[in-house]
Image: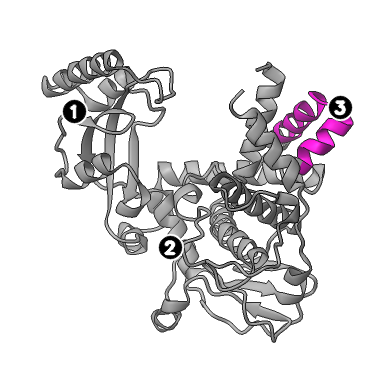
Amino acid sequence: MKTKEKSKIVIIVAIVLVVAVAAFCVWYFGFNNSAEPAASIDEKSDATEKVDIAADNTEKLIADEEVVSGGQKKEVVEAFEEESDGVLMKVNGEPVDEGIFQFTMNNMAMQYIQSLVMSGAVSDVEKFDWNAKDPNYDGTYLEYVKDNAVAELVPLYALVAEGKRRGISLSEEDMQEVRNWVKEMQGEQTDEEFANFLKEGGCPSIDVFENQRAFAMLEEKVCMDFESNPEKYATKEQLTGASDGERVTVQHILIPFNPDGPQAGVTDEMKIAAKKLADEALNKVKGGGDFAEIAKEYTSDSQVQYTFGGDEITEKAFKDTAFALKVGEVSGVVEASYGYHIIKRIERAFVIDDYAMLLSKNAKVEISREALDKVVLTVDMKAFVDYITQNMNK
């Protein structure tokens, strides 16, 4: 594949992931049609309505009164009686950029339609009816992607707001970096190619493209600040309460069967060689070596440490081993479907995922029904699906 073509695919895929610089969105607010959406859009009697992301515990939160938001008290639920003043959505009083909402909704729809095409449920994207009833959801397909766009943006805007309260912002140098990045993307293509590139990626305009990039950069800065000092944002007790079920933190070493990636061509010789490397790494760990340092030497994974819950990982061997270990204990060589793992369970880390859940549960979300109903999909679904399916395997 040509470098330029490969670069374009990477960027389009990156756009589809919207603001994936925050890892918590991948697992907690991922596009899962079997999950109950965070905010339902069924009742349409009022021009504006509040959508409570944590409806089940609203009364308890009101009774407790104290909700984490920079360590200050915050009223969780407040009647939204004022006129919508044209704002589509607010999170804790902060207006959500309409272009970013459009971008996010388009991307939700793109992920959904791609999954339907890949599963064989949809063969003709152009004839797909977004206003039809979704059999797996109490509403239409379009309402579903709108709901998921709301759920995606609530923690992001709440997180960025909390970062701003602590003095985190984008400098002029940061903004210039954003502008330069956009110009670089634009300069690699003709005007027509770039326009198609934005449409294929679900982006309404170049201005939204730039705003989205800036928002993602600010979000990343907040995430990095949280990771360096989570206690500045919330206590361990509050973060623990935000966790959805038991979660563990592990460090691991991954030795894949096939170091080149594809698992279809794995041979017995490859597995023998991978096992030898895994045994070698494990012996160094047992010999008293620092696990993290040995992991950096041997692992093929770009990330050594993970924090996750039981429903967030599908590899059964890895999951079962991680939860069975005691803190400080190291596993033997664990065979998974794609390679060998060595796993060490460490003291539970409190990551941005926990804080995102906490913010979402306590967020006050206001939505203008009138404005939301007017939002339509602005993405060439057929062009997107055709491009991805034709080029990803080149």
Mark positioned earlier in the residue sequence (1 or 2): 1
Q: Identify the magenta region.
A: 176-199
| Residue at disc 3, secondary structure | loop
* Residue drawn at (76%, 75%) of the image: 370
The residue beneath circle 2 is 358
- Compared across the picture, whether 318 is left or right of 154 comes to left
The amino acid pointed to by label 1 is: Val
Q: Is residue 349 above or below residue 55?
A: above
Q: Is residue 263 above or below residue 231?
A: above
**Image location (x, y in percent) of residue 82:** 73, 82
> What's the mark number on residue 190?
3
Of residue 391 and residue 187, the one placed in the foreground of this image is: 391
- Compared across the picture, whether 104 is left or right of 29 comes to right
The amino acid pointed to by label 3 is: Thr
Question: Magenta region, mostly helix, strand or loop?
Answer: helix
| Residue at disc 1, secondary structure | loop
**Image location (x, y in percent) of residue 342:** 22, 30
* Residue drawn at (26%, 13%) of the image: 273
| Disc 1 packing (10 Å; few <14; some 14–19; many ≥20) | some
Q: Is residue 32 visible?
A: yes
The residue beneath circle 1 is 333
**Image location (x, y in percent) of residue 25:** 50, 50
Q: Is residue 168 visible?
A: no
CA–CA distance between discs 3 and 2? 45 Å
CA–CA distance between discs 1 and 2? 36 Å
